[in-house]
Image (cartoon, grey):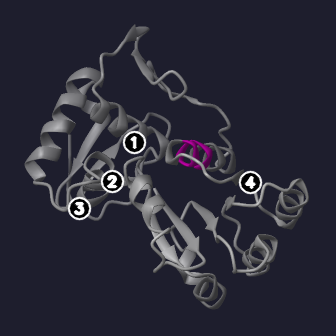
């Protein structure tokens, strides 16, 4: 999933770590400056959420939140701030932020809060996803098929989470690569195919469809198929 990460100074040595860490949690973080985001609304196209990590010297975070909302952007917004002041938090939330976290904070918590905001924005506020007889619980990091607990590896769990968060969407090889191997600059298509094949053996072959030339799509009964730009095979 793509998110916009707005940083006060992207060239600073104190920034950049979050974008790299979020990649390991299945997010593609597009790093931007406040000025660029104010000028170009298309920066947010395709993004599911916004993270404001402004640091010091960039003015009140609430002002940047208001700027985003005045531009008509409706994506959920998470503010990361070094200011542990309840008044600053209230001002940001009243300005249109959806969550406010005081730094320092672990990337795992940021990722969890992003997932929660995105679920709420999509009308699904639970940590539990159901697709027929397949159930995935993010809180306990476990999945069941027909009430039988599945023995999933970390990569298999990440894959299933990615598919169930956006059922029907075509997941490209690049997106899957970032999800499974965030620390590797390149990854063979064969390695991804192996992971897909292993997950299929555990949840059923027909749930994940191959879209030739593009990637894979999770098929869920009751959800209309995504627009097809390539040939789809089982």
Q: In this view, does 115 lie to the left or right of 161?
A: right
Q: Which of marks 1 and 2 is nearer the N terminus?
A: 1
Q: Give the range drawn in magenta.
A: 109-114
Q: Which of marks 4 and 1 is nearer the N terminus?
A: 4
Q: Are the residues flagged by discs 3 and 4 in contact, CB closer than 8 Å? A: no
Compared with 211, 197 (above or below) is: above
Q: How far is disc 4 from disc 1 in space, using C-alphas?
A: 28 Å
Quarter of the figure with residue 218? top left
Q: Nearer the viewer, mark 4 or mark 1?
A: 4
Quarter of the figure with residue 109? top right
**Residue 135: x and y, percent?**
47, 22
**Residue 215: x and y, percent?**
24, 54
Q: Nearer the viewer, mark 3 or mark 1?
A: 1
Q: In which quarter of the image is the C terminus?
A: top left
Q: Are the residues flagged by discs 4 and 1 in contact, CB closer than 8 Å? A: no
Of residue 4 and residue 86, the one placed in the foreground of this image is 86
Q: Are the residues flagged by discs 1 and 2 in contact, CB closer than 8 Å? A: yes
User: Which residue has dot 4 on it?
Assistant: 100
Q: Is residue 23 left or right of residue 173?
A: right
The secondary structure type at the circle numbered 3 is loop
């Amino acid at each position: 999933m793509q998110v916009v990460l707005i940083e006060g100074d992207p060239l600073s040595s104190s920034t950049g770590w979050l974008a790299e860490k979020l990649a390991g949690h299945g997010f593609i973080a597009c790093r931007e400056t406040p000025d660029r985001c104010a000028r170009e609304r298309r920066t947010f196209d395709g993004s599911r959420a916004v993270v404001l990590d402004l640091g010091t010297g960039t003015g009140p975070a609430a002002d940047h939140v208001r700027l985003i909302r005045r531009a008509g952007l409706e994506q959920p917004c998470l503010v990361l701030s070094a200011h542990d002041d309840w008044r600053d938090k209230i001002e940001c939330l009243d300005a249109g932020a959806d969550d406010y976290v005081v730094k320092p904070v672990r990337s795992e918590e940021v990722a969890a809060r992003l997932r929660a905001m995105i679920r709420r924005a999509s009308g699904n506020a639970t940590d539990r996803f159901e697709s027929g007889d397949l159930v995935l619980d993010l809180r306990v990091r476990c999945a069941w098929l027909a009430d039988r607990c599945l023995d999933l590896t970390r990569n298999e769990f990440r894959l299933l989470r990615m598919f169930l968060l956006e059922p029907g969407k075509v997941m490209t090889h690049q997106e899957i690569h970032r999800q499974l191997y965030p620390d590797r600059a390149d990854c063979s298509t064969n390695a991804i195919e192996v992971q897909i094949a292993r997950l299929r053996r555990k949840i059923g072959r027909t749930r994940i469809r191959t879209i030739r030339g593009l990637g894979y799509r999770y098929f869920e009964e009751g959800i209309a198929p995504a627009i097809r730009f390539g040939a789809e095979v089982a």
